[in-house]
Amino acid sequence: MSELLEKATFAGGCFWCMVKPFDQWDGVYAVVSGYTGGEIENPTYELVKTGESGHFEAVEITYDPKIISYDKILELYWPQIDPTDDGGQFHDRGPQYRTAIFYHNKQQKQKSESSKQQLSHSGKFKQPIVTEILPASPFYPAEEFHQDFYKKEKEAYDIDRNKSGRDEFIEQNWK
């Protein structure tokens, strides 16, 4: 493992569904569910789920750029979301479930903007791409219950994911 690990932070709706797509790649050392983008320090799930704290549910990915590039992580991110929905994601509605890429440096900002522009011009979606690209702000890990939910609570995760509509959207729009 390189001593020069980097962070990538993404909001894509419910953080439960955003861990697994990144968790299983070589070079990814941690995918933490949490909250970012709001003004309140150390928010709780109960506060964030109201949609009034300004936070996004997000994942913070710790990765080794010598093994997996930020470009590859961006390639993994986009097909997990509906980038045209500014009211949440799938059955999770509200500002806390909006999509966003939080960049940690100028290079990530440039790559994120470029990938968004490529998607916008691809013709894949008729509606505008509304995923925001924002500077990274303090990231607060969610409560332990929410970490690795897809592993610890497989049945509940599968039920929630199946009823969300996410997989149908991915199949129809990204495959």
Image: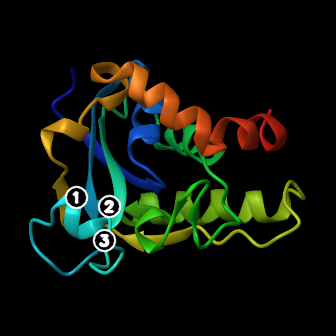
Q: Are marks 3 and 2 in contact (CB under 8 Å)?
A: no
Residue at the image position 75 percent from the left and 57 percent from the top:
119
The nearer-to-camera label among 2 and 1 is: 1
Q: Earlier in the sequence, mark 2 or mark 1?
A: 1
The x, y position of residue 163, in whole percent, is 60, 39
Which sits in the foreground, 135 or 53? 53
Residue at the image position 57 percent from the left and 37 percent from the top:
76
Tell me the CA gap for discs 3 and 2: 17 Å
Q: Are marks 2 and 1 in contact (CB under 8 Å)?
A: no
Q: Is residue 104 above or below residue 148?
A: below
Q: Which residue is mark 3?
A: 55
Determine whether, in the image, residue 15 is placed left or right of residue 29: right
Colour scheme:
rainbow
User: Quadrant location of residue 67?
Assistant: top left
Count of labels in the image: 3
Residue type beneath disc 3: His
Residue at the image position 58 percent from the left and 72 percent from the top:
87
Q: Is residue 66 above or below residue 118?
A: above
Tell me the CA gap for discs 2 and 1: 24 Å
The nearer-to-camera label among 3 and 1 is: 1
Q: Earlier in the sequence, mark 3 or mark 1?
A: 1
Q: Which residue is mark 2?
A: 104
Q: Which mark is residue 45?
A: 1
The x, y position of residue 72, in whole percent, is 55, 36
Q: Which mark is residue 137?
A: none
